[in-house]
Image: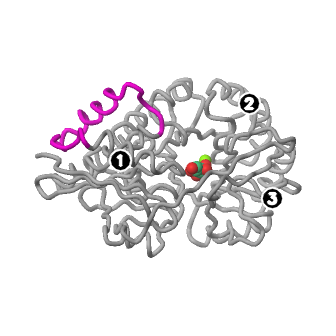
Amino acid sequence: MKITDAKVFVGGPGKNYVTLKIYTDQGIYGLGDATLNNRETLPAKYLEDYLIPCLIGMDPRRSEDIWQYFYRSTYFRRGPITMSAIGAIDMALWDIKGKIAGLPVYDLLGGKSRDGALVYAHATGSDLDQLIDSMSYYREQGYTAIRVQCGIPGMPTPGYGIAGKDEDARHYITKYGALPDLEIWDTGKYLRYMPKVFERLRAEFGDELKILHDVHHRLLPREAAAFAKEVEPFDLYWLEDPTPADDQTSLRLIRQHSTVPIAIGEVFNSLWDCRQMIEEELIDFIRIAATYGGGITHVRRIVDLAAIHHVRTGFHGAPSHSPISMAAQAHLNAWAPNFGIQEYLVLGTEACDALFPSDHHYAEGEFHVSDAPGLGVDFDEKEAAKYAYSRGYHPVVRLTDGTMWNY
Ligand code: KDG
Ligand code: MG
């Protein structure tokens, strides 16, 4: 069996999804996702200029060897661009493998460990009342785990993941400007207000609800340790990215002062990036994504390392991931013995479903993986022709005195 061609498509409804399609001489094709949010053209170009020319003629069944070929032959290895491109190829090869076998990918990984995978939604509010309304909406939709981001009184701009006053907080998705928007961040105001938010949410929603919160890399290690200690009584399911992910040693201070579960990893791309925090047991959930994490082959290794250190999965699932990488993660979630939770924002707009038909679906707080052979997602090229690339940027963040800070 041979790979005969591979094409990259960039675009989608309100998103620049980077979709790889690998064709074979047996008529079977595979699909992969290389969407690197706000840098989408780079993995696309990397695939077209460097990886696809080598891929033609390879045997698609040899997915391990192909992974090693691209990883080891890249002298300047790792990083988000390289690993997204390798990840897309890897997903497509697992898709092909499943279609050859007539089995869903989860069966190739070792079979299902569960039927539905717990997911969490994003609730947001420019203030506490709007947040509570947004949370109530998700409770009605059956979610038992909700991430909460709340506007802070007096904060000059809304902040990460927070809807503006006049926006629909129930269906809010971060918008990215054609040039970077400016966000102003005040750590003191955040640290003084957030504990009050959690206290009110517990009073409002009771003890059972799983409450998650994303600090989005904004705190210094000492601030994060003090914050984690202070919010301990509110029994968070996790506190995400309390400090910038670059320095994993700073997590030790948080661990020494608090037992709040820590979730990190959405900006990491390889086992080597995650290794220290997993081996030192500095985190409780690993947030890497199948896309930037080198696909199923590599993320599976990370999941196995995590398992022996009591770390559970909590894969990244921001709206920038196309239904293809969400499907790859759904298969990993169905299999992983140390599955924790999956971030899930309802992608299912009609336009997105038309572009990526599948029977993966959400029901009652869980994501149900498709039983179709392979990844269980298709790609409609006619639909794809409707979309074009449109540049976007993450916001930039400055402190109130103008100092550059972390988005
Ligand atoms: O591209 C950046 C987003 O994926 C990130 O801001 C989303 O932090 C995020 C999350 O937890 O979903
Ligand atoms: Mg995050």
Viewer can see residue 104 = no
| Residue 380: x %, y % from top left | 31, 68
Label 2 to label 1, Cα distance in Å? Answer: 35 Å
Q: Is 292 positioned to the left or the right of 226 in the image? A: left
Mark earlier in primary sequence (1, 3): 1
- The image quarter containing residue 122 is bottom right
Mark earlier in primary sequence (2, 1): 1
Q: Is 206 positioned to the left or the right of 104 in the image? A: right
Viewer can see residue 262 = yes
| Residue 402: x %, y % from top left | 83, 42
The disc labelled 1 sits on which kind of residue? Ala
Most foreground residue, 286 or 80: 80
User: Label 3 crowding class (10 Å Cα cut-off): few <14, some 14-19, many 20+?
Assistant: some
Whether the magenta-drawn stretch holds residue 69 is answered as: yes
Secondary structure of residue under mark 3: helix
Please state the extent of the stretch shown in magenta in the rendering.
53-80
Write down the residue under mark 1. Answer: 88
Residue occupying the point 87% across, 57% down: 153
Most foreground residue, 162 or 147: 162
Most foreground residue, 55 or 374: 55
| Residue 61: x %, y % from top left | 18, 43
The disc labelled 3 sits on which kind of residue? Arg
Secondary structure of residue under mark 1: helix
Label 1 to label 3, Cα distance in Å? Answer: 43 Å
Tell me the number on the disc at residue 137. Answer: none
Write down the residue under mark 3. Answer: 200
In the rendered image, the residue lying farthest to the bottom is 350
Write down the residue under mark 2. Answer: 221
